[in-house]
Image (tube, rainbow, N blue to C red):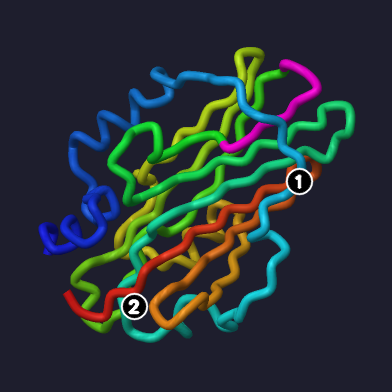
């Protein structure tokens, strides 16, 4: 199973089983963050406002298939005009170059205060009867400080394989919508609105009906 998914999608990090190496990388990852300057954000990403067919009823309304994430976009903006912070990042699950896997698309801030945002979203969705592949939840983070902006996306250690995706997303405070973009293409958009910050996270998937 693992070799088949690796061949198709070029990555093994979407698997449901968390390895010991991943646990060590997760715990040490925040210590290795590098901040960089980025172009100013001129507006919101298109995925926030574009119209596409929505699947009503949640994950249980999906047909029996396996959805494997191929890319993600994460956008955050503060509501305080004095801060004026906006950050947009991109994550590829198929790129081989480390620089292309995760990067800051743009970032704007009127001050140098430290900032961190975080959202959770599934990168592997298995709605088949047997669920042999399993499901995976990732934590997506963006940070800002006086040196610039940084992105840090890793598989979440807080998600249990037996836990439903709906309950997991509710636990972390995110609302979600599911869209079908094409015959074998889907998208999940997770959003979170607080008193100070608005967040949007788009995950696009390829559908696999048999492995």
**How packed is label 2: few (under 14 Cα within 10 Å), some, or many (20 or more)?**
many
Q: Which residue is mark 1?
A: 43
Q: For the N terminus, which image quadrant?
A: bottom left
Is 191 one of the magenta-colored residues? Answer: no
Q: In the shown orientation, is residue 140 left or right of residue 48?
A: left
- Is 12 situated above or below 47? above
Task: Write down the region rendered in magenta.
Answer: 105-112
Query: Callout 2: helix, strand or loop?
Result: loop
Q: In the shown orientation, is residue 88 left or right of residue 25?
A: right
Q: Nearer the viewer, residue 157 or 108?
A: 108
Q: Position of residue 26 (x, y in %)?
A: 33, 32
Q: Say which quarter of the image contains residue 66.
A: bottom left
Q: Nearer the viewer, residue 166 or 44?
A: 44
Residue at image coords 26%, 80%: 209
Residue at image coords 60%, 57%: 174
Q: Position of residue 181 (x, y in %)?
A: 52, 75
Specify which label sits upstream in the sequence, 2 or 1: 1
Q: Which residue is mark 2?
A: 127
Residue at image coords 10%, 58%: 3
């Amino acid at each position: 199973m693992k070799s088949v998914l690796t061949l198709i999608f070029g990555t093994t990090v979407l698997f449901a089983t968390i390895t010991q190496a991943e646990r060590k990388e997760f715990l040490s990852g925040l210590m290795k963050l590098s901040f960089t300057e980025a172009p100013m954000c001129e507006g919101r990403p298109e995925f926030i406002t574009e119209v596409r067919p929505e699947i009503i009823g949640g994950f249980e309304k999906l047909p029996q298939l396996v959805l494997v994430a191929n890319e993600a976009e994460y956008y955050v903006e503060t509501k305080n005009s004095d801060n004026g912070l906006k950050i947009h990042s991109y994550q590829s699950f198929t790129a081989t170059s480390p620089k292309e896997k995760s990067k800051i698309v743009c970032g704007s801030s009127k001050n140098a205060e430290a900032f961190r945002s975080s959202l959770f979203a599934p990168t592997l969705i298995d709605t088949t009867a047997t669920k042999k592949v399993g499901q995976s939840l990732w934590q997506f983070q963006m940070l800002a400080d006086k040196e610039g902006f940084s992105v840090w996306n890793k598989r979440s250690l807080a998600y249990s394989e037996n836990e439903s995706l709906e309950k997991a997303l509710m636990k972390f405070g995110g609302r979600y919508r599911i869209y079908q973009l094409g015959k074998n293409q889907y998208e999940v958009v997770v959003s979170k609105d607080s008193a100070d910050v608005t967040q949007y996270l788009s995950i696009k998937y390829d559908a696999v009906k048999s492995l």
